[in-house]
Image (cartoon, helix red, strand yellow):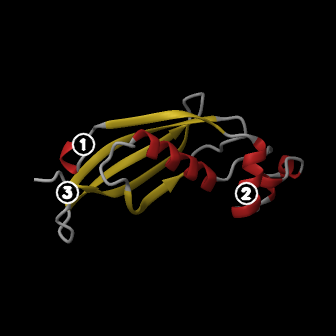
């Protein structure tokens, strides 16, 4: 298991290989982001994108899944403290295969929760062509090693 003390700035974790299908993309968008360029392949041709694109929020959800898989050995799990920034520099399209790269940017002890530390990191999501499709800056609470 990985504890707060095991993390260091510059440390990286990665996981990949999630391919998103059109039916899944459309179903997610119909439920959570019902915009025509996410739900209607024909109408999407007349959109800004010119094609059907995956919701950025679905890209974020897939990225979270991949992050959880990459960091599955973190003691106590990944207790999110929020997002500082999320960006989608390139649209994801059905058929893309995503992977994440997580880079630890810093850590500090928690002033209010002595059993925990706070680890900050940058998460980058890439498609099969190594093009960045999402970035996020976030922090998580992590258990300190029992003494």
Taking depth in this image into account, of 65 and 87 the one nearest to the observer is 65
Q: Residue at x 45, y 51 (%)?
A: 136
Q: Mark 3 vs mark 2: which is more N-terminal?
A: 2
Give residue 83's position: percent from left, percent from top.
43, 61
Looking at the image, residue 16 sits to the left or right of residue 110; the answer is right
Circle 1 — which element?
loop
Give residue 92's position: percent from left, percent from top.
66, 42
Taking depth in this image into account, of 33 and 21 the one nearest to the observer is 21
Residue on which disc 3 sits: 108
Q: Badge 1: how crowded within 10 Å, few (<14), some, or many (20+)? A: few
In the picture as drawn, the residue positioned furthest to the top comes out as 129
The residues tagged by marks 3 and 2 sit, at their Cα atoms, a distance apart of 37 Å
Q: Residue at x 46, y 41 (%)?
A: 69
Circle 3 — which element?
strand
Q: Mark 2 vs mark 1: which is more N-terminal?
A: 1
Q: Residue at x 21, y 42 (%)?
A: 6
Residue on which disc 1 sits: 9
The residues tagged by marks 2 and 1 sit, at their Cα atoms, a distance apart of 36 Å
Give residue 130's position: percent from left, percent from top.
54, 29
In the picture, the disc for residue 29 is: 2
Looking at the image, residue 88 sits to the left or right of residue 26; the answer is left
Q: Quadrant of the N terminus?
A: top left
Give residue 118's position: percent from left, percent from top.
26, 58
Please say whether residue 37 is visible from this viewpoint: yes
Taking depth in this image into account, of 131 and 5 the one nearest to the observer is 5
Q: Nearer the viewer, mark 2 or mark 1?
A: 2
Q: Badge 3: how crowded within 10 Å, few (<14), some, or many (20+)? A: few
Looking at the image, residue 145 sits to the left or right of residue 93; the answer is left
Q: Residue at x 22, y 42 (%)?
A: 8
């Amino acid at each position: 298991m990985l504890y707060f003390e095991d993390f260091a700035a510059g440390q990286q974790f990665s996981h990949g290989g999630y391919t998103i299908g059109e039916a899944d993309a459309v179903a997610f968008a119909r439920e959570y982001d019902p915009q025509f360029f996410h739900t209607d392949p024909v109408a999407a041709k007349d959109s800004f994108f010119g094609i059907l694109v995956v919701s950025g929020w679905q890209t974020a959800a897939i990225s979270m899944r991949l992050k959880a898989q990459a960091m599955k050995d973190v003691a106590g799990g990944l207790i999110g403290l929020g997002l500082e920034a999320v960006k989608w520099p390139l649209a994801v399209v059905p058929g893309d295969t995503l992977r994440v790269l997580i880079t630890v940017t810093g850590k500090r002890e928690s002033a209010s929760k002595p059993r925990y530390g706070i680890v900050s990191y940058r998460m980058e999501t890439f498609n099969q062509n190594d093009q960045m499709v999402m970035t996020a800056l976030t922090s998580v609470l992590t258990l300190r090693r029992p003494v």
